[in-house]
Image: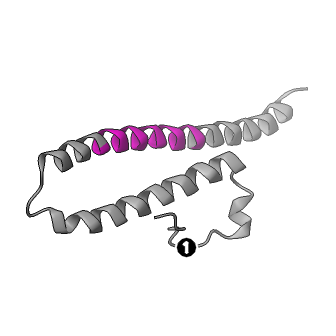
Amino acid sequence: MDTDTRPHPTPKDDDDLLSPLEQEVLDAYAKLAGNLDNLSTILAGLADNPSVEILDALRGLERKTSTVFTLLKASVYSIVLQQEIFGDEGEGEGLGHAVRR
């Protein structure tokens, strides 16, 4: 299950917008999404007759996945917020220099 699941390769220009850590997080999320898709395909055959062990394992997986997803959303929100703040500071500096005498 260790395959590259990115639907579209990212252009080189976009790579410069993200730090290596941010790109690694996004790649890991894409890999996780692909692995979950593969798992859902495999488990589709077992859905008709689930065992107690499978249900318990899936509940644990669901908890872990929801935690990871929540952390990912918070990280992405933080990145977007930081970019907006830094963008506003850049614009604000230009205005500040124009007002000062």
Q: Residue at x 18, y 46 (%)?
A: 53
**Residue 16 versus residue 61: which sits nearer the camera?**
61
Amino acid at dot 1: His
Q: How many marks?
A: 1
Q: Is residue 66 magenta?
A: yes
Answer yes or no: is residue 19 visible: no
Question: Circle 1 — which element?
Answer: loop
Kindly indicate the quadrant of the structure image that contains residue 96: top right
Answer yes or no: is residue 43 visible: yes
Q: Position of residue 7 (x, y in %)?
A: 50, 72
Q: Residue furthest bottom?
A: 8
Q: Report whether 98 appears left or right of 74.
A: right
Q: Which residues are magenta?
A: 61-79
Q: Report whether 49 appears left or right of 19.
A: left
Q: Residue at x 55, y 73 (%)?
A: 8
Q: Is residue 78 magenta?
A: yes
Q: Position of residue 54 (x, y in %)?
A: 20, 50
Q: Residue at x 91, y 26 (%)?
A: 101
Q: Report whether 80 appears left or right of 53.
A: right
Kindly indicate the quadrant of the structure image that contains residue 84: top right
Q: Position of residue 40 (x, y in %)?
A: 28, 63
Q: Is 96 drawn above or below residue 31 in the view shown? A: above
Q: Residue at x 59, y 41 (%)?
A: 79
Quarter of the image with the N terminus in it: bottom left
Say which residue label 1 marks: 8
Q: Position of residue 89 (x, y in %)?
A: 72, 35
